[in-house]
Amino acid sequence: MRLYSQHLLGIIVLSVLVVCIALGGGFQLNEVGARAMAQGGAFAARADDPSAIYFNPAGLSFQGSSIYLGTTFIMPKVTFYGPSNLSLNDETKMVDQTFTPINIYGTYELNDNIHIGLGVTNPYGLGTEWPANWIGQSIAQKIDLTTYFITPTIAYKVNDQLSIGAGLNYVTGKVTMKIGLANFPFDAPLPIVNLDLSATGIGFNAGLIYKFIPDLSLGISYRSSVKLDASGSAKFDPNYTVLALPNGDATATITLPATGFIGVAYKAMKNLEVEADYQYVGWSSYKELAIGFKADPTKNEVLPKNYQDTYILRFGAEYTMDNIQLRAGYLYDHSPVLTEYVEPMLPDANRNGYNIGIGYKICENWRVDAACFFLKFDQRKAENTVPTIAFDGTYNMTATLIGINIGYTF
Amino acid sequence: MKQYIVLFITFAALIAALLNGCTDSAPTAPVIGLGNSTVTKYVSIGNSLTAGYQSAGLYKSAQLYSYPNLIAQQLTKAGATIGTFEQPYWPDPGIPDQSTGKASRYVIYGWSGGTPLIGPIGETVIAGAPENAATVLRPYDNLGIPGIPLAGFMDTTGTYQSSPLGSRGILRWDNPGSPFPKSVFFQAAALHPDLVTFWLGANDVLGFAVSGGYSPNAPTNPAIFSALYTQALDALRNTLPNAKIVVGNIPNVTSVPFFTTVNPLLAPHIPGPYYLRYQRHGTLGMAFDSTKLTETNAPLVTLKGQAYAALLGMPTGQFWRDAAALQGKTIAELYPALAGAGIDTTKPFGFHPQNPWPDALILDADEIASATTAVNNFNSTIASVAAAKGAAVVNFNSFFNNVKVNGIVIAGEKYTADYISGDIFSLDGVHPSDRGYGIVANEYIKVINASFGMNVPLVNISALPKLSAPLAKGGNGKIDPVLPFGAFNSLDLLFSPSVR
């Protein structure tokens, strides 16, 4: 009885925290658990906490029943210099914003061989906002994409060496976007379209973990792409009635890319685990962002993106001392954006990420994890941008991410 | 345990500090300068396109965005010591229309049934001469003279400059005691420029095209054009042996909205069994040529024709009354001639052979071919003469052909050759808008930089004004403009000097 009331208290505390955490999204966010984040996200070969639901569902087999939840504070900083194709080198700073994608997981051990779990994450999201009336207002003013992945998952432990797992992704997405009407000839404030769109989609994920020996494991996982056919409303501001701007129903289609991990983890010393992962991201699914206006399809906009498939290299380590775990990691994230397609709606560059973190086991049931992650983007020069963008310049970018998670084990 | 948390926080702080130190420095600004050259005087020679003519008018608020003035500003940024680039400013609302005495410029003054109302609005002209005629005691740096053909460059008789422009307004030959030499060429030479832009020749074909092949009835003879062009560049090169000379070639007339706007608007109003009956080049009376305006190589109804679009199928002699008025006659005076040629204005206008669409409002296939051949001949002359005289060439022909097909995106904003919505051309559909002139200036600057090793910064197009329009009034935004009868007749005068 006492045991149950303690569990109940834990669940209530966690529920309150969930409600208190600001929800949001900040396009791919692999920061879905502070423990993995502190290790450069190199986690697919172990996946021994509930974030396995994201990294590798097979990992559920090697853990018990628990709840794990947290958030990541993402604080990007972007400065644009240009546009150089107009001989300008003017500095424009992106509006500072903090994004807080969440992660909530529950896992449950049905029996020795079957584990189930449920996860709610925001693995794709972005937000950029540029100052009002800036020179690039026809290309990018403000965009926020938030996706929720609700992922019921099941894992089957074939034997002590091999586990397999799979999950279903029920995805809800929301896009709010402000962009200047691209063809507006009059000497008056540019009509900015406010798009408010939402969508749902379905995908799946699957993975396996194989332990060659107890200290050496291999993890492979895959998550499918998800096509989001979003619909909603468009509202122009200012709305010049003379121009019959296509207010009303609007649509957009975004395909979230497929991704896969392959990783190897090794217990190098009694207290030290190390892991190296290769993550593939199928960004070539993101060819364009097509915006449709029901009221006047001649005003439809197709924003070319032409992203390329890419990869991320991840390295992490965790050192355990009593009830404290110290973690560190590094990642290299290769940009999916070609130089001639770099644009301010989501400027991107190759990134080096440096991570550290700490885990603390407060008592038998409770633990807390924190991670600090500094993301340094290579300076990106947008040169000879395609004629549909024609916006050359230089982007300086950094991001700081702080992750916090709390776990409760039954 | 505590020490680890302290350690973690220390590490976190360290990383945060690192973060700020890790930010990339600002990129170095693009190099700006004149390379190994100096520019102490820039002179622009040309026609209405060079003067900064817009929307069938010449007025200060448009002249400030003439391409020569924009180039001069960019040259100054690059270190040129050209001082004030002097242009002959006509205070807004600008020059008068010869027939009304009121300002000739067109404006969008409202919206009707969802379409823009465009026309001159009877603005009272403030000044008959440039406001700075008495204060600029030397030739103007901008010698763009609306209306002049190539032959006007060396002319010392004033034949090619219609009042109030040309010889009186811009060249100021008849100011009492005028010290100004008597030709565009002599005035340019007197300024001793080390950089000259020269963009003449368009009027040797444009007047023919704008008037529907009516006035004059043929482009300048290519052999004469060639002789005049050679003479002009010879004169410039011999007088200014060290000057950097940049010439512009001639866009295809059919790449401007004056010729491309109306066909798609008018075609839906030609019902199933009917055809537009139109006067082919040189036809005076009845006409049996017919078109749906949608076939390949269809004749092109000019923007002037848009004014008469609503009269299609109606028993009307509106066009002939307006044509008579333009000649200072009444319809009664003109009518016997019309009747003699078989015209019967009680027949449905545009649909009946006896009340055909007038030659002056349409460029037929022969006229298009004639204009295109002229442009091609002129441009090959320009290319060869420029090469022989060491002048760089800006290929506006290919530039505007590309704009017509693909449009152009600058800083995310799309510009096209569409009337009004494209924002490259002003309301007359021939002359650029403020931003259009900025785009022209940048084409010159690109050639100047590439040819002379300079790094003159480009004009920031996004900072130039767009078209002015009363957007607060009603309408549905379809660009199906309502134009007054006789619209753009002033362009005929502009492009048709009395002698060629």
Image (spheres, coloured by chain):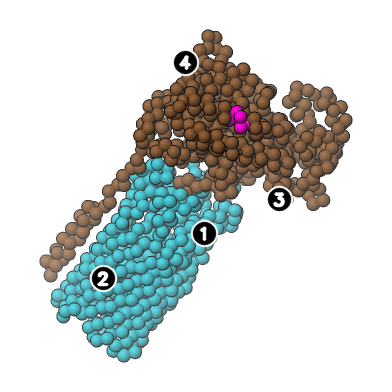
Chain colours: A cyan, B brown
Question: Could you say whether the residue bearing mark 3 is in a helix, strand or loop?
Answer: loop
Neighbor class of circle 2 (other Cα within 10 Å; few <14, some 14-19, many 20+) is: many
Q: Is residue B125 visible?
A: no
Question: Could you say whether the residue bearing mark 1 is in a helix, strand or loop?
Answer: strand
Q: Are marks 1 and 2 on the same chain?
A: yes
A207 sits left or right of B446 in the view = left
Task: Name the residue tied to disc 2.
Answer: A315
Quarter of the rendering containing residue B279: top right
Question: Could you say whether the residue bearing mark 2 is in a helix, strand or loop?
Answer: strand
| Chain letter of the residue beneath label 4 in the structure image | B
Quarter of the rendering containing residue B480: top right
Q: Which amino acid type corresponds to the residue marked 2 in the rendered image?
A: Phe
Q: Are marks 3 and 1 on the same chain?
A: no
Instruction: Indicate which disc residue B30 carries.
Output: none
Majority SS type along the magenta span: helix
Q: Looking at the image, do the residues carrying marks 4 and 2 touch, with CB atoms under 8 Å apart?
A: no
Q: Looking at the image, do the residues carrying marks 4 and 3 touch, with CB atoms under 8 Å apart?
A: no
Task: Name the residue tied to disc 3.
Answer: B296
What span is in magenta? Answer: B225-229
**Which one is closest to the eye, mark 2 or mark 3?**
3
Task: Name the residue tied to disc 4.
Answer: B137
Residue situated furthest top in the rendering: B177
Q: Earlier in the sequence, mark 1 or mark 2?
A: 1
Q: Earlier in the sequence, mark 4 or mark 3?
A: 4
Q: Position of residue B376 (x, y in %)?
A: 62, 40
B138 sits left or right of B98 in the view = left
Task: Name the residue tied to disc 1.
Answer: A290
Q: Nearest the camera: B269 or B442? A: B442
Tell me how many marks there are: 4
Q: CA distance from mark 1 to mark 2?
A: 37 Å
